[in-house]
Image (spheres, rainbow, N blue to C red):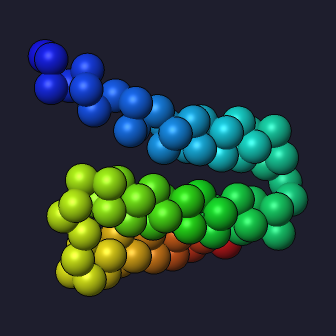
Amino acid sequence: MLNLLRKTPYYLPLIGVFALGLLAFISFPTDKFFLSAIIISMSSAYVAWGALYHIIHKDFSVVILVEYVSIAILASVATLAVLG
């Protein structure tokens, strides 16, 4: 439990970005261009957060960066496909 509390400050910005993205998604459901920009922004923030997190913890590598980029691309493509 103590380990979880130590990691919480690192995850709060990511949760904040996703919460704001969800709020924007709900607020502007008909503007496809804006929704696409939100998706790309959230994906970019996810990759940046992941890179910074691992740089801070001194375990960053290209493999980790590729993993974050792959997940971001997969989530973006899937969400954009659902939006049509």
Please state the horizontal and vertical placement of residue 29, each as a whole percent of the image. Answer: 79, 48
Q: Nearer the viewer, residue 19 or 30?
A: 19
Q: How many marks?
A: 0
Above or below 41: residue 8: above
Where residue 77 appears, as percent x and y from the top left, is 51, 75
Residue at x 15% of width, y 26% of height: 3
Q: Position of residue 84 (x, y in %)?
A: 67, 72
Left-right relation of 32 to 59 = right
Q: Is residue 24 left or right of residue 74?
A: right
Q: Is residue 52 left or right of residue 64?
A: right
| Vertical order, 6 against 11 (above or below) | above
Q: Residue at x 56, y 43 (%)?
A: 18
Image coordinates for residue 41, horizontal then vertical, percent: 65, 63
In the image, 20 versus 8, the foreground residue is 8
Foreground residue, 16 or 7? 7
Is residue 66 visible in the rendered image? The answer is yes
Image-based side of 33 in relation to 2, left or right: right
As rendered, which of 30 and 62 lies closer to the eye?
Answer: 62
Residue at image location 75% in from the left, 43% down from the top? 24
Whether residue 79 is visible, yes or no, is: no
Question: What residue is shown at x 18% (from left), y 64% (from top)?
Answer: 59
Which part of the image, by quadrant, shows the N terminus?
Answer: top left
